[in-house]
Image (cartoon, rainbow, N blue to C red):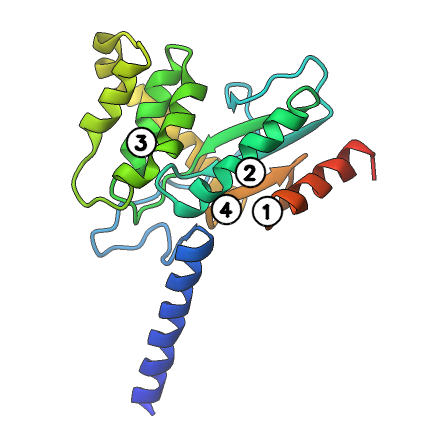
Amino acid sequence: MKKNVKNQLVAALVLVAALAAAFGSFLLFRPDAGGGARALPEPAADARVVRDDSHRLTDPARSRVTVVEFLDFECEGCGAFHPVMDRLKKEYGDRVTFVARYFPMPGHRNSGSAARAAEAAAQQGRFREMHDKLFTTQREWGEAQEPKDAVFRAYARALGLDMKRYDADVTSARTAERVSLDQRDGLALGVQGTPTFFVDGQKASPRGYEDFKALIEQRLSGR
């Protein structure tokens, strides 16, 4: 009997892992789980889908819809959605505000440092450029078991950032707290994996470009 239960548990974990590889990254343990996993912060008491300082990828003069993505730069599902989001931003950027929020997953070796690199770039007004660079190069550094901080630093240099300031910002408590705040909001809002989308404050699960486009059109039409 115990053997059957164990086999069922193993099969379930294999299925979850396969789904994660195909569609994104998911939390396989509680935020307070041990075992050496990188701990997630406590959920925010005053959680918000969007904050005043959240990073906007588009900033229309008259925004009619807001799309928020909680993302992990190392997540393959987020990487697969990146061209979809790029296409939607080009089509709807004059009417829709697209927002990116950090949610580095504990199981990814370099997701936290990638988020801090993006935030350090943001402090020099180059978040969008670093955001795109991290996703377009994901296959070059993603899933690595060794630290990739030097790779991210090279991206910062290529973007023309002030490197002395970047080096200070990427390791600062302020930057770490900024990333943590997004995670805390996400956890309180029920984010369990990446990418997780919210459209006008409501969680959404689009399966691809056409699905997402239909959802945006529905919101724009007021339905």
Q: For the residues marked 2 and 3, what is the alpha-carbon distance in whole angstroms?
A: 21 Å
Q: Which residue is mark 2?
A: 84
Q: Residues within 10 Å of mark 4 (few under 14, many from 20)?
A: some
Number of the label disc, if any, that sits on residue 208? 1
Q: Which residue is mark 3?
A: 114
Amino acid marked by disc 2:
Val
Q: For the residues marked 4 and 3, what is the alpha-carbon distance in whole angstroms?
A: 19 Å
Q: For the residues marked 1 and 4, what is the alpha-carbon distance in whole angstroms?
A: 19 Å
What secondary structure is marked by label 1?
loop
Choose mark 1 or mark 4, whichever is in front.
1
Instruction: Write the residue at 66% across / 47% down.
Output: 211
Name the N-terminal-most of marks 2 and 3: 2
Q: Residues within 10 Å of mark 1 (few under 14, many from 20)?
A: few
Above or below, comparing residue 114 to residue 105 in the picture: above
Q: Nearer the viewer, residue 89 or 46?
A: 89
Q: Residues within 10 Å of mark 2 (few under 14, many from 20)?
A: some
Instruction: Write the residue at 73% across / 25% down.
Output: 64
Amino acid marked by disc 1:
Gly
Above or below, comparing residue 219 to residue 171 in the picture: below
Image position, residue 86 (x, y; %): 54, 30
Amino acid marked by disc 3:
Ala
Instruction: Say whether residue 169 is visible.
Output: no
Quick check: marks 1 and 2 in contact, CB under 8 Å?
yes
Number of the label disc, if any, that sits on residue 191? 4
Instruction: Say whether residue 117 is visible.
Output: yes
Q: For the residues marked 4 and 2, what is the alpha-carbon distance in whole angstroms?
A: 20 Å
Name the N-terminal-most of marks 4 and 3: 3
What secondary structure is marked by label 3?
helix
Quick check: marks 4 and 3 in contact, CB under 8 Å?
no
Name the N-terminal-most of marks 3 and 1: 3
